Image (cartoon, helix red, strand yellow):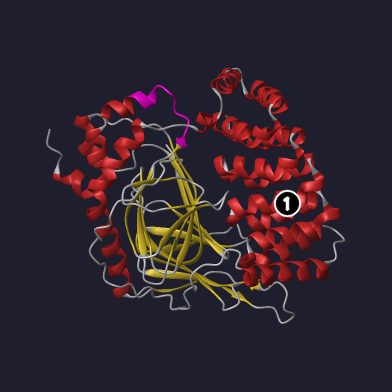
Amino acid sequence: MELSTTLRAAFPMLAMVFFAIPVIASAQQTAGSAMKNGIIVLTSFEGDVKITNSSSDQTLTPSKGAILKQGQIITTGPKSKASLAFENGIVIEVTPSTKFLIQEFQQAPWDVAPDKLAEMKYEPSKSKTTGFLEYGDIITGVKKLKPGSSLEVSTPLGTAGIRGTDFQTSAVKNSNGSPKSFTVGVASGEVGVRSAGSSQAVPVPAGTASTVAMTPSQSGQAGTIQAPVTSQLSAEAGSGILASVSAQRTSGQTIFAQSVVSAAQNRQPTLSSLTPEQQKTLIDAAGQGSESLIEAVKQLVTETPPAAPEIAAAATELAPNAAPQIASTAASISRSLAPQIAAQVVSVAPTLAISVATNVAQAVPESAAAVAGAVASVAPNSAPQIAASVAATVPEAAVQIAQSVATAQPQQASQITSQVVASVAGVDAKAVGDATQKAAQQASNTGINAQPPPPTNTNPQFPVPTPRPTPQATPQEIRSPR
């Protein structure tokens, strides 16, 4: 059957995948409509590109066509870049000198009949995608999302919410590592931009850019995050964004199709890390509801305390909404592993990071600071809120909690200070501020989170270089998470 010209133009990569694996997609439907970990492909890379697991700091060797997963960090050197393609049609170019975390990518099972392919204008099924840009630039192309889907790109200073558009996000740091500005330039569609701590999004239409800046405090403590300021996007920047998105879709479509077919056939849940008996216990319990699943977690962790992080993560995959209760149950039994339990559970259910950290800290208050820091490492865009919520739960350890989270996310020390001080009545604001600033400075001095020098360009017009041909990278072995 011939794919129509309309479909090839509207959804070039996914069209190939849908045509290639209708049987696989149909088989996935039997699992129900709940969203699962989506497939992400590294379609190309060049230069110094590092892929790191946020929960373990394990570094993987990149290879063209490798399958990535949520919780992995892509870091590029000064003359390096990487292109990512998501199962729902999103493409992202990670430009030179950038650090970007794929925090979450969930997608519902989909099925598209061959005779209906040409009619498809949206992503194939509902999805949820979040990413965190610590510094640098990413260029993103998004097909129209289905009702109920979401895509957010966060930075230390704010968040961009997207429905379907082509845009560039920039996060700039000061020389001391603190956040300086966050800018979104929109070439097509519209993006909603909001400052960190604000619930009000400012619409940014095509042809404009919006910048959120940090005004330093005279006292040297927490600065002030300004409201978004909108300006015109230069024609050169807009055309550069569109050219990058087009190049990613065209050059990556073949390797994307091949990798998605393979990954879909070999999709494996986190349950595979457990014994067959443990897997059966959790699956049977999950079929009876969350309460039964939590009781099963209690039983398995009591029997094998060292396996608590893996047991909790596997249970969370079966019932993501029960993540806070699963994590706190496991941590209350295997108390010494509370930070690892919280981090692994959040790697499966990152949008519940604040609740997971708070529940585990409440269950194991002696480890509250370590728990908050571990969860902030996995969910950086929630770091200030994690610190504030955990500190409010265990107020006697507020200073240590703020310090631990600032060590994990030194670039957000000012916001961590502000939110902890605002959330804990009677806390010594100076002690919190001194602790976070000291932690951030020590992290910088000892090389924690050390990466290539961050970009210093603050021009909101995003001068974008002409996209280069896709490099012929030599495939190297990488362990597939599927």
In this view of the protein, which residue sits in the foreground, 25 or 99? Answer: 99
- Which of the 4 image quarters holds residue 293? top right
The number of numbered discs placed on residues in the rendered structure image is: 1
Residue 64 drawn above or below residue 277: below
- Is most of the magenta stretch helix, strand or loop? loop
54 left or right, relative to 88: right
Residue 468 drawn above or below residue 246: below
| Quadrant of the snapshot with the C terminus | top left
- Which of the 4 image quarters holds residue 430? bottom right
Q: What x and y, as percent, mark residue 154? A: 52, 58
Query: Which residue is painted at 71% across and 26% down in the image?
Result: 298
| Quadrant of the snapshot with the N terminus | top left
Q: What x and y, as percent, mark residue 264? A: 35, 34
Identify the secondary structure beneath mark 1: helix
| Residue ID for mark 1 | 370
Q: What x and y, as percent, mark residue 348? A: 55, 40
Residue 11 appears in the rendering? no
Query: Which residue is painted at 39% across and 31% down in the image?
Result: 109
> Magenta span has 97?
no
Magenta extent: 27-36
Q: What x and y, as percent, mark residue 392? A: 79, 52
Query: Which residue is painted at 32% across and 43% down in the image?
Result: 122
435 left or right, relative to 108: right
Residue 358 drawn above or below residue 249: above
In this view of the protein, which residue sits in the foreground, 345 or 335? Answer: 335
Q: What residue type is labelled 1?
A: Ala
> Magenta span has 30?
yes
